[in-house]
Image (cartoon, rainbow, N blue to C red):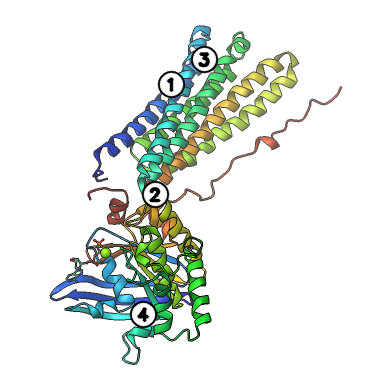
């Protein structure tokens, strides 16, 4: 593990009942970098992502083996509270999923829950700064008490990102965050990801090779539950080492 | 290499490669004909070479347009990306080689009555070497063969050495008889053009190597004497 490793996965295997979905994955995720996870549908990208904040614990029949360390600390340690872990490792999903509450409350919910804010002016300030960082503030500043669900898809996704960063996580996991968005909304999110990289470690699952190439510094290719190849994004997309990677990213049937 | 799931993508890449190969064949032919025209000498053949150059130019245009369209519409990755870039770069080097061959043919009027067969034949041999280099690098391209590409790249030194020694010979002749200065200057340009064609083949060799291996060919190459240092003492004053 290098000094810049934020998340370290060692020999991680995941089972859903008897079915094994991930096989002995070793992967280091660098601090303050964007790492993209790519690979064909069903190869285990989301499964891996859910290991990092122990979301798999909530799935019935799902069993995780191996070690995952956050800043060198075992996330499966008994003394580690999964709720606290999820505050440190936030998640943004494919489909924007704002709570059925106001824009304001969507962002304020997490910080209140984790006791990051107590006074009203503190909450207001955090909501505003989170929305600003998510690039949404200007568009919602005069309708902050309208329901989050009244926003467009792209705005809702930025709201979910604002919600995720409001609790000041260290790592943000994003599972296909742009798959339902148009090119302009996608570009906004990608620009945002690039800005967030300054302060957060980001892991993004995407089916768009171009998006992985645009936003990430590191890329990991999964195939049938195996981590096939991992390296600098530039290297993966110009001259991958493994034939399976090459076939996948060039659209060959193998 | 397995096939693309989208079949028309394979067809487009194949068409691009085909056009580059066609262009390579034309450029090699132009070099050969321009030298033959010089040796014979055959003004009609030289004229033919000059006219045929536009065909190579047109092919280069088509290749770069097709490659740009492929980049925009297919957004190729990995080996496909390298394939599109290689086509653009190789077409550029072939177009320049064609221009240089045309330039050789254009010098025929001055060199037509040239008496020194020996120097002409030496230049033609140098041209032949450059022709082989071009043929080999095109073979490396068609077989995506990094080993052959590297060989071509290393062999360029022979042409460079010939070019240097020719230059010394010309300097000597010109000093002996200043009436030959014009002819030898033109002959020197012919040799220079051939040497440049050799350089374009080494560029192509690099492109083929990168296409095949995904890493640049950047080991240091043994370098011959430098033209800048070629120098012959003037005859002693009497
Ligand atoms: N809750 C679950 N119960 C049982 N099997 C599951 C569950 N979630 C995922 N799997 C299985 O685990 C494997 C990996 O699934 P996962 O969702 O991680 O793939 P993915 O790479 O994210 O695919 P996609 O690109 O389609 O989102 C698949 O075979 C899938 O069927
Ligand atoms: Mg998934």
Q: Which mark is residue A86?
A: 4
Residue B29 badge: 1
List the residue tagged with mark 2: B213
Per the image, label 1 sits on a secondary structure element best described as helix
Q: Indicate which disc residue A196 carries.
A: none
What distance separates the C-alpha of mark 2 from that of mark 3?
37 Å
Q: Quadrant of ligand 2?
A: bottom left
The reply to whether callout 4 and callout 3 are in contact (CB within 8 Å) is: no
Q: Residues within 10 Å of mark 3 (few under 14, many from 20)?
A: many
Point out the tag, 2 or 3, that comes first from the N-terminus: 3
> Do marks 2 and 3 share a subunit?
yes
The answer to whether marks 4 and 3 sit on the same chain is no
> Residue at 46% of width from left, 67% of height from top?
A33
- The mark nearer the N terminus, 3 or 1, is 1
Which residue is at the far bottom? A79
Q: CA distance from mark 4 to mark 3?
A: 73 Å
Label 4 SS = helix
Q: Which mark is residue B50?
A: 3
Nearer to the camera, A198 or B12: A198
Mark 3 chain = B
Residue found at x 47% / y 42%: B206
Residue at horizontal 30%, vertical 76%? A51
């Amino acid at each position: 593990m290098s000094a810049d490793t934020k998340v370290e996965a060692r020999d991680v295997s995941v089972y859903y009942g008897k079915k094994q979905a991930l096989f002995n994955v070793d992967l280091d995720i660098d601090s303050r970098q964007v790492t993209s996870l790519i690979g064909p549908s069903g190869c285990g990208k989301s499964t891996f992502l859910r290991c990092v904040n122990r979301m798999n614990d909530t799935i019935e029949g799902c069993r995780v083996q191996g070690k995952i360390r956050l800043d060198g600390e075992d996330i499966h340690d008994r003394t580690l509270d999964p709720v606290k872990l999820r505050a440190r490792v936030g998640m943004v999903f494919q489909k924007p999923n704002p709570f059925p509450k106001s824009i304001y409350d969507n962002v304020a919910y997490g910080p209140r829950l984790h006791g990051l804010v107590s006074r009203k002016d503190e909450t207001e300030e955090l909501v505003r700064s989170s929305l600003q960082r998510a690039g949404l503030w200007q568009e919602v500043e005069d309708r902050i008490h309208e329901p989050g669900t009244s926003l467009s898809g792209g705005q809702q996704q930025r709201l979910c990102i604002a919600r995720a960063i409001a609790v000041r996580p260290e790592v943000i996991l994003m599972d296909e965050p742009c798959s339902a968005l148009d090119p302009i909304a996608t570009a906004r999110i990608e620009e945002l990801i690039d800005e967030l990289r300054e302060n957060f470690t980001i892991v993004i699952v995407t089916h768009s090779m171009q998006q992985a190439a645009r936003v990430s510094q590191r890329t990991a290719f999964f195939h049938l539950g195996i981590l096939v190849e991992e390296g600098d994004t530039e290297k993966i997309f110009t001259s991958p080492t493994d034939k399976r990677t090459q076939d996948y990213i060039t659209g060959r049937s193998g | 290499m397995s096939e693309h799931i989208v079949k028309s993508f394979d067809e487009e890449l194949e068409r691009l490669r085909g056009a580059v190969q066609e262009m390579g064949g034309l450029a090699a032919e132009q070099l050969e004909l321009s030298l033959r025209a010089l040796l014979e000498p055959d003004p009609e053949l030289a004229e033919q070479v000059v006219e045929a150059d536009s065909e190579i130019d047109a092919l280069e245009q088509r290749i770069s347009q097709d490659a740009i369209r492929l980049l925009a519409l297919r957004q190729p990755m990995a080996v496909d990306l390298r394939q599109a870039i290689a086509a653009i770069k190789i077409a550029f080097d072939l177009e320049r080689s064609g221009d240089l061959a045309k330039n050789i043919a254009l010098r025929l009027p001055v060199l037509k009555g040239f008496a020194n067969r020996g120097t002409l034949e030496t230049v033609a041999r140098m041209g032949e070497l450059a022709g082989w280099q071009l043929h080999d690098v095109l073979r490396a391209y068609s077989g995506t063969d990094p080993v052959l590409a590297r060989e071509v790249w290393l062999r360029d030194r022979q042409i460079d050495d010939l070019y240097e020694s020719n230059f010394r010979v010309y300097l000597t002749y010109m000093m002996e008889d200043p009436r030959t200065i014009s002819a030898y200057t033109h002959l020197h340009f012919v040799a220079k053009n051939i040497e440049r064609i050799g350089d374009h083949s080494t560029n192509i060799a690099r492109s083929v190597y990168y296409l095949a291996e995904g890493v640049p060919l950047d080991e240091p190459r043994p370098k011959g004497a430098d033209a800048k240092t070629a120098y012959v003492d003037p005859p002693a004053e009497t």
